Amino acid sequence: MKIIESISEMKNVRWGMDGPVGFVPTMGYLHEGHISLVQRAKKENASAVVSIYVNPTQFGPKEDLKKYPRDIPRDLAMLEKAGTDVVFIPPDGDMYPTGYNTWVDLEKITERLEGAARPGHFRGVATVCNKLFNIVEPAKAYFGQKDAQQVLVIQKMVRELNMNLDIVVCPTVREPDGLAMSSRNTYLKPDERKAATVLYKSLQLAQKLYDSGERDAGKIRRQMTEFIQKESLAHIEYISIANVNTLDEQEKIAPPSLVSMVVRIGAPRLLDNIILK
């Protein structure tokens, strides 16, 4: 496994790699969800590249950039075990040199849900992914369904900028009790970790209501809200039932629909979703 720490070296190594190349962009502090993406990239491509980069441009001024968990030695051990060919760990100065002022800014789809809650977030996400795709030049890039809006943003960027790669969306990987795996789960205190299961349970409630024939999105949102509010440590930021492609909110469910939410459990901000088909 090669470890590369500059853009120029990554470009040089890339030309000698067996293709096609599968790419998994990460911010590190890996968990089994990330590793499942790497394993799929290995299965479907001749070579697998993983980036570890905590991208500062997708964090707001009041967000947790400095506190974001980091453990590069642990990450490298996990990636080597998974059979990763190249790990790319660029420095900020390489990614955003002095005077940097070029951005990828998508409209409409980034103006709701996470985009409304975190202004500028998706500009940072789209810009860094664009840069990483240009550096690594993968045939396929792998993302998890847990970050559903991010996936839609990246897919739209790739499609509308005519990029020559496929975006592969992989299922959310969950803990045995249903909590979606996330690097931010490490912020949870023991009582908060127990309370955090309310997210997936509320999504299961939505699925159950839908399966029983309920199509009134407002009624499902209200029942989900009431269920979550029974957990004293949970504070709802939003619950959305939207068109899976446009993220337009629905009043009458017309599948496939994305049921997504952000709920704070104590300080940590957790997100999760399912698709009603």
Image: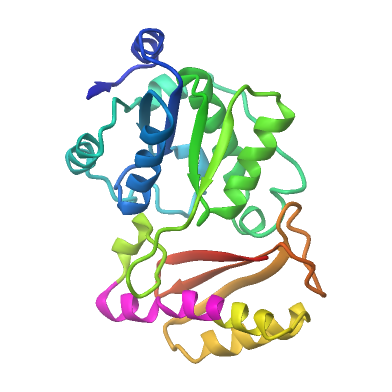
The single residue placed furthest to the front in the displayed view is 43
* Residue toward you, 100 or 71: 71
Which residue: 45% across, 38% down?
56
Which picture quadrant has residue 247? bottom right
Q: Position of residue 160 (x, y in %)?
A: 74, 30
Which residue: 64% across, 52% down?
115
Vertical comparison of 29 with 186: above or below? above
* Residue toward you, 88 or 37: 37
Task: Determine if residue 276 is in view.
Answer: yes
Task: Determine if residue 105 is in view.
Answer: no
Which residue range is magenta in the image?
A: 189-204
Q: In this image, 66 relative to 244: left or right?
A: left
Residue 147 painted magenta: no
Vertical comparison of 28 with 194: above or below? above
Q: In this image, 267 relative to 272: left or right?
A: left
In which quadrant will I find the C terminus?
Answer: bottom right
* Residue toward you, 104 or 212: 212
Which picture quadrant has residue 18? top left
Q: Where is residue 164 in the image (x, y as percent from the top left)?
A: 62, 22
Vertical comparison of 96 with 29: above or below? above
Q: Main secondary structure of the magenta part?
A: helix
The single residue placed furthest to the right in the displayed view is 252
Vertical comparison of 219 with 253: above or below? below
Which residue: 52% across, 84% down?
228
In which quadrant will I find the N terminus?
Answer: top left
